[in-house]
């Protein structure tokens, strides 16, 4: 006989998902109502306006895609690119690689601008690629690279894209709620995020936002978006401004209660206060990690406070350490990905998990298992 599944109570300090605030977990348990119920529709409007706050944008086309961050990424590429288009993809980690895959699966050509893992995207290399490819339609990059813990200069990269008549696609999955994301000030055209990082919500939803320029590009398409589910013109029938909302797909009703609660928590704390909390706890964790002899992969000025990537000392069985943290301390930290696999640990301080207690707990546990 199969038993009820009761997950252990872990502290999640990896690259995501992060610990979910109990307020959000209890929001999930509220009664399910219809996805076209007038009360639910009113809640959707609040979700949209709180997302505009989190993204710092007035973009009307700002909504949560009913699927994880990868679907938000795909929504941006499939709506903006058509077969035969050219897109410049800046790659400095795992997720830039996925962007390239998306471009190619749209039947478009990807021009790669590569930087070493652990380094930010170099604006000079992007400028050169734009000069070499005046026919490019899109520039895509990851603002906060979760595989390396590096932050790229989104404002400069979006400006370069706009000056060269390109639309910008920005991955803000790990940034929203942890560091500043300012869609309107950056002039970004299509931005996607995720709920499971600094929003501390359950995984499975991807907030997205499209500028007027991006909407115009979508309206001027000569081919149909190849994905029915992610076609923004169809999704708008449900999430759009019109009062008469039409069925597109059955929205994940309770997960959207959870998102509403998490955005409310962010609004109550205030964006600036949330960024300051991430910065403060990161500095404390960094001081402790460095005192233990661990060194950061990323130069200080480009480090993400919400994702601390440190080099594993020689002679350490890194998987055994993570296993022991999980088994003995119920503490999850992340392993390295791609070329950094086996070489680094990724220690998250995201959203609800970003607090002083967790900083001290993580340092003390790591110190014990490294003895
Ligand atoms: N982009 C970045 C930077 C991420 O860190 C992730 C997930 O970790 C994704 C995209 C994909 O999001 P998801 O795993 O929710 O599909």
Image (cartoon, rainbow, N blue to C red):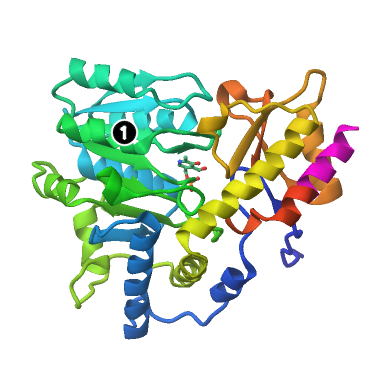
In the rendered image, residue 230, in percent from the top left (x then y), is placed at 29, 52
Determine the secondary structure under disc 1: helix
Q: Position of residue 315 (x, y in %)?
A: 82, 19
Q: Is residue 198 visible?
A: no
Q: Give left or right: position of 153 versus 132.
A: right
Badge 1: few (under 14), some or many (20 or more) residues near its Cα, within 10 Å? Answer: some
The reply to whether residue 26 is in sight is yes
Q: Quadrant of the N terminus?
A: bottom right
Question: In this orientation, which residue lies closer to the viewer: 224 or 144?
Answer: 144
Q: Quadrant of residue 235?
A: bottom left
Residue at 30 percent of width and 39 percent of height: 169
Spot occupied by residue 13 in the image (x, y as percentages of width and height):
67, 47
Q: Main secondary structure of the magenta part?
A: helix
Q: Judge from the rendering whether residue 332 lies leftward or rightward of residue 44; answer left or right.
A: right
Q: Is residue 7 above or below residue 103?
A: below
In depth, the one of 40 and 134 nearer the eye is 134
Locate the C terminus and report the quarter of the image it occupies: top right
The span picked out in magenta is 361-371
Tell me where residue 41 sits by quadrant. Answer: bottom left
Residue 365 is inside the magenta segment: yes
Please give the residue where the numbered disc 1 appears in the rendered image.
Answer: 156
> Is 203 above or below relative to 238?
above
Q: From the viewer's perspective, is residue 224 above or below residue 238?
A: above
Identify the residue shown where x is 51% and y is 32%: 302
Residue 257: x and y in percent read 47, 72
Q: Is 124 within the magenta?
A: no
Question: At x 26% / y 21%, what residue is drawn?
Answer: 127
- Side of 280 relative to 3 (left or right): left
Residue sitting nearer the eye, 290 or 20? 290
């Amino acid at each position: 006989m199969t038993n009820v599944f009761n997950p252990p109570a872990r502290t999640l300090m990896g690259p995501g998902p992060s610990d979910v605030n109990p307020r959000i977990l209890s929001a999930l348990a509220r009664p399910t109502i219809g996805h076209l119920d007038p009360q639910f529709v009113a809640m959707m409007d609040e979700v949209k306006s709180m997302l505009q706050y989190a993204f710092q944008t007035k973009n009307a086309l700002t909504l949560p895609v009913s699927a994880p961050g990868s679907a938000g990424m795909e929504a941006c590429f499939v709506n903006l690119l058509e077969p035969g288009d050219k897109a410049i993809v800046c790659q400095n980690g795992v997720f830039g690689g996925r962007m390239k895959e998306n471009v190619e699966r749209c039947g478009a050509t990807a021009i790669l601008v590569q930087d070493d893992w652990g380094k930010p995207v170099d604006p000079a290399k992007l400028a050169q690629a734009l000069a070499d490819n005046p026919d490019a339609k899109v520039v895509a990059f990851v603002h906060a690279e979760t595989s390396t813990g590096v932050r790229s200069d989104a404002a400069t990269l979006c400006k370069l894209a706009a000056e060269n008549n390109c639309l910008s696609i920005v991955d803000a999955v790990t940034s929203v709620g942890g560091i500043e994301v300012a869609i309107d000030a950056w002039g970004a055209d299509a931005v996607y995020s995720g709920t499971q990082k600094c929003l501390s919500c359950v995984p499975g939803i991807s907030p997205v936002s499209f500028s007027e320029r991006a909407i115009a590009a979508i309206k001027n398409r000569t081919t149909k978006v190849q994905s029915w589910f992610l076609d923004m013109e169809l999704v708008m029938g449900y999430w759009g401004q019109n009062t008469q909302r039409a069925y597109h797909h059955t929205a994940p009703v309770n997960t959207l209660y959870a998102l509403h609660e998490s955005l409310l928590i962010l609004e109550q704390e205030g964006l600036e206060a949330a960024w300051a909390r991430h910065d403060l706890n990161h500095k404390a964790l960094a001081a402790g990690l460095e005192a233990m002899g661990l060194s950061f992969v990323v130069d200080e000025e480009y480090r993400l406070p919400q994702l601390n990537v440190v080099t594993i000392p020689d002679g350490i069985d890194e998987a055994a350490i993570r296993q022991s943290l999980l088994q003995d301390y119920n503490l999850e930290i992340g392993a390295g990905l791609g070329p950094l696999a086996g070489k680094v640990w990724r220690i998250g301080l995201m959203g609800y998990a970003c607090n002083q207690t967790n900083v001290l707990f993580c340092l003390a546990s790591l110190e014990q298992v490294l003895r």
